Amino acid sequence: MKIVALNYRVNLTILTGLLLLLCLHVSCETKKKVNPVEVAKTENDPFISIVSKGMDFICPDTISSGWNTFYYDNRSNDTHFFLLDKYPEGKSIKDAEKEVGPVFQKGMDLINQGKAQEGFEAFNSLPAWFFEVVFVGGSGLLSPNKSSLTTLKLDPGYYLMECYVKMPNGTFHSSMGMTKALIVSDEKSEYMPPQAQVKIDISSTDGIVYTGTPDKGKQVISVYFKDQIAHENFVGHDLNLVKYNDGADLEVLESWLNWADPSGLISPAPEGFLFLGGVNDLPAGSTGYFETDLAPGNYALVSEVPNAIKKNLLKTFVIE
């Protein structure tokens, strides 16, 4: 099926609009940096706490710029992640409500009617400012009652936090409350990124290539984005850590990770797969970090793109 060709920035911003059809009020609880007992090393670890108890993000309204480590605690019954979208100056979630939502509703209606090309062509009516939105990372997918640590470097500005996993009826979590404004202030944090034991390069040309071997126990993994492109589902590559059962079909995992598939990114996730975080989309040349605690078992590092296996964007390893 031929899809209307769009440039890289247009393609990557399309997904944000799909997920932000309407602004939803999310109650926010402001917390100071906390020490989650599951992963903390000392009482002074500089974590920004994000909690999901349902279709929500409970977290600070404002954080410092520079390096920040986000502790994401998914206490809900659904698979979630958080992705940070940096908005152009002067624009906010209210602008998305007024200028973006109606355009994407029309496009989605056409796609759901089987008119995919017409649907994607409808996105050409988006306001020019919307194509200035930049994806600046977040956590990887996280299964219910799991937590993750992700370290990112953020510039001052206005950001939108979102999750676009879908319900069984196809409704995006973001349209059910999983969007939240976040202000990154001019005040700079005093923290530096952690030291990585495993270093991963990810790109559209070479896929996932890592230096160092994941081992049992706690470790920090860095993810360097050598490039960033829009894949067939109009999003860029990211990195997700998944633990899977013996006999689990990795092609099922690959298919489920494609949001454009009618059954893709539907919560609950396929049986036999446990999502443990990672690093969401980052621009080319950027590096994000995540910490994990690996128990014995089968694992995959995988990107949320179509045909991840052929693209070397799905790599497996075993912890004995």
Image (spheres, rainbow, N blue to C red):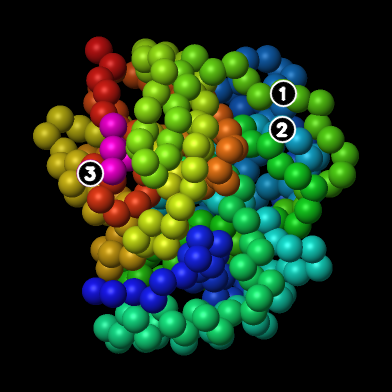
Residue matched to label 3: 310
Which x, y percent locates residue 83?
Answer: 56, 51
Q: Residues within 10 Å of mark 3 (few under 14, many from 20)?
A: few
Task: Point out the stretch of residues depicted in magenta.
Answer: 310-315
Dot 2 amino acid type: Trp
Numbered mark located on residue 192 in the image: 1
Tag 1 or tag 2, which sits nearer the N-term? Answer: 2
Q: Residue at x 69, y 72 (%)?
A: 129
**Which residue is at a point 56% across and 84% down the rendered structure image?**
125
**Residue 70's spot in the image, x, y percent?**
63, 36
Element type at mark 1: loop
Q: Which residue is the extreme one toward the right? A: 187
Label 1 or label 3, whichever comes before in sequence order: 1
Residue at the spot of label 2: 67
The type of residue carrying mark 1 is Met
Magenta: main secondary structure: loop
Cβ atoms at labels 1 and 3 below 8 Å apart? no
Q: Which mark is residue 214?
A: none
Residue 84 versus residue 56: which sits nearer the camera? Answer: 84
Q: Are marks 2 and 1 in contact (CB under 8 Å)?
A: yes
Q: Position of residue 253 (x, y in %)?
A: 25, 46
Q: Is residue 87 left or right of residue 226?
A: right
